[in-house]
Amino acid sequence: RKEVEQDPGPFNVPEGATVAFNCTYSNSASQSFFWYRQDCRKEPKLLMSVYSSGNEDGRFTAQLNRASQYISLLIRDSKLSDSATYLCVVNADPSGYSTLTFGKGTMLLVSP
Amino acid sequence: ETGVTQTPRHLVMGMTNKKSLKCEQHLGHNAMYWYKQSAKKPLELMFVYNFKEQTENNSVPSRFSPECPNSSHLFLHLHTLQPEDSALYLCASSQEGTTRQGAGYSPLHFGNGTRLTVT
């Protein structure tokens, strides 16, 4: 099982739609979780951290399910500007000198 | 303004050239990283410096040589690269807890990357 796994998509949705992505991780001891956004040919940018109790930032909601080892990102009222690749990032091996492990990303395309 | 600046933005080099990538962070962070991003692959960690000490190498070929003179600056020296080394090279920084704690508990802040083409 890959350390961090995402559906590559693309997810094609119309403006105003609600869309959700999941990301599974393999190490049950992982402690840090993030969603990043990457636009084409640009650097990744932090979208939001994911907390155990779930958290919301405007139209974006992130949740963590430790029992099933996945995190999710929900985007409500999609905008054209939400079109990007969303990267799931996990501290996959917190027992050692670990660093964040990135998924391959899920591409979202929002159309008019 | 990302707080992490990389130069150059684009670089084309032959397989016999020697070049260096530069990264500078203005965020007061204590950890810096080099990542490689190739098409259709996840970001691959190359090097980590935590409090200026290299803590992870990840079996990167010796044709890539990092240098971290202080906590704000990071270099990646390149020599005798191969065409398959063509990729986007991203520098990042983060604020980690202690000198001996593994990195990976704080989010990364990326520079805008150097797009490298090896001919």
Image (cartoon, coloured by chain):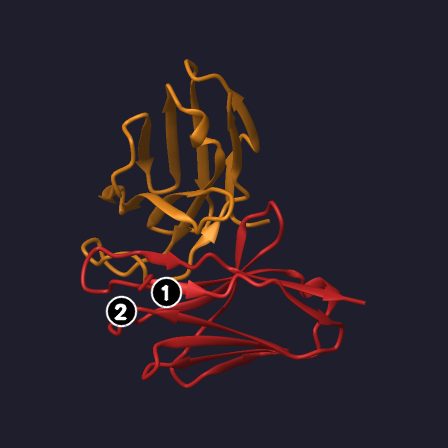
Foreground: B111 or B95?
Answer: B111
Q: Mark 2 points at which residue?
A: A27
Q: In which quarter of the image is residue A109?
A: bottom right
Which quadrant of the view contains residue B91? top left
**Which residue is depicted at the point 43% across and 17% down?**
B15
* Residue at the disc numbered 1: A90
Chain name for mark 2? A
Q: Chain B is drawn in which colour?
A: orange
User: What amino acid is at disc 2?
Assistant: Asn
The chain to which mark 1 is attached is A
| Mark with earlier residue (2, 1) | 2
Q: Is residue A9 above or below residue B58?
A: below
Shown colour of chain A: red
Q: Please determine if labels 2 and 1 lie on a single subunit.
A: yes
Tell me, yes or no, whether the two marked residues, 2 and 1, touch with CB atoms within 8 Å. yes
Residue A53 placement (x, y as % from top left): 41, 86
Question: Could you say where residue B56 lies in the image, as x and y percent from the top left?
Answer: 24, 45
- Amino acid type of the residue that numbered disc 1 sits on in the rendered structure: Val
